[in-house]
Image: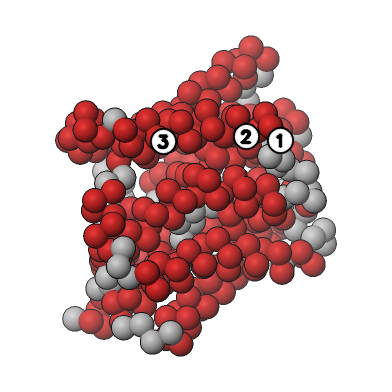
Amino acid sequence: MRWPRWLPVDPFIAALLGTVVLATLLPARGSAADVGRVAATLAVALLFFLHGARITPRAAFAGARHWRLHLVVLFATYALFPLIGLAAAPLRPDVLTPELYQGLLFLCAVPSTVQTSIAFTAIAGGNVPAAVFSASFSNLAGVVLTPLLATALLHDTGAARMSAGAVGTVVLQILVPFALGQLSRPLTARWIERHRTLTSRVDRGSILLVVYTAFSAGVVAGVWDEVSPARLGVLVAVVCVLLALVLGLTYAAGRLLRFDRADRATILFCGSKKSLATGLPMAAVMVSPQLLGLLVLPLMLYHQIQLVVCAWLARRWGARQA
């Protein structure tokens, strides 16, 4: 069955929401929760192995000469977002609960998306080789930068701490599988290219497993008692404002720095994205299961909203070019 095109929700987001509902109604408990955590750990390692095997260094570095553009995108991803997140501190605790504010900060530390950044840049008539490099390098850098940045941002809240044990966990579950994936490319790249549908399902299935175990632990710990429908609506509004600010500032930066139209499109669509596929597994590695459900909620909302808004923007940019 094909997903109805008239539905505004991405099918993967619908699956995520369904997984959250399932975890809320039938959370894993006891030995089942232990099995789920082990399976989620293995799924995260497999996910980052596939990320490493999928990223093509040669194709990505074809756009490396646009260093000014890449610096702007990196600044937006790893500096502008965190600065906005820190500036939102007065929203705590009256507007956002401390846990949801932690989730907002974690969202600000996550790398850019790869596939959608490149796709929207292409639809808008942007600089696609530069988008390939920026999006790929954002994820490569994020393997190291996101855990460090998230630890720094969440240090005062205590949600994530880069202790010696946490460093070892990040290395074993993220860096080592990613490096092995890169090293395996001579053997695995062609197979992965031929079986994109299968690897995509493995990617998404891994994320759904992490979401189920995370929200199961949260339900058992009683975290949903802290999020009312009104509070959820406020969080959606805050996430929309965050996206609007980043889109406006990246667009303004492109014009002020006198980039041409194609490069401005690349900055806009690469600098405003945040990757659920990378961010959620990283959160699962860094944060205790009891805190994980609420921590990733802002990222899940931002991911869906950015898809809808940026798809509309990309089509408008592309129509103007035509």
**Which class describes the residues within 10 Å of circle 1: few (<14), some (14-19), or many (20+)?**
few
Which quarter of the figure is the C terminus placed in? bottom left
The picture places residue 165, in percent across and down from the top left corner, at 67, 29
Are discs 2 and 1 less than 8 Å apart at CB? yes
Dot 3 or dot 2: first in sequence order is 2
Cα–Cα span, label 3 and label 1: 21 Å
Q: Amino acid at mark 1?
A: Ser
Residue drawn at (71%, 35%) of the image: 163
Quarter occupied by the N terminus = top left
Measured along the vertical axis of the image, is residue 179 above or below residue 74? above
Q: What label does residue 86 carry, if any?
A: none
Question: Which secondary structure lies at badge 2?
Answer: helix
Tell me the colour scheme of the image: secondary structure
Three-letter code for the amino acid on which mark 3 is drawn: Phe
SS at mark 3? helix
| Badge 3 vs badge 1, beta-carbon distance below 8 Å | no
Q: To which residue does mark 2 refer?
A: 167
Please identify the residue farthest to the right as the structure is shown. Answer: 94
Q: Residue at x 68, y 39 (%)?
A: 162
Can residue 314 be seen in the rendering of this structure? no
Q: Taking the image as drawn, is residue 57 in sight?
A: yes
Residue 163: which disc? 1
Q: Which residue is mark 3?
A: 178
Q: Residue at x 38, y 46 (%)?
A: 11
- Name the image quarter holding residue 186: top left
Residue 277: x %, y % from top left: 45, 44
Separation (CA) of disc 3 from disc 2: 15 Å
Residue at 36%, 53% in the rendered image:
136
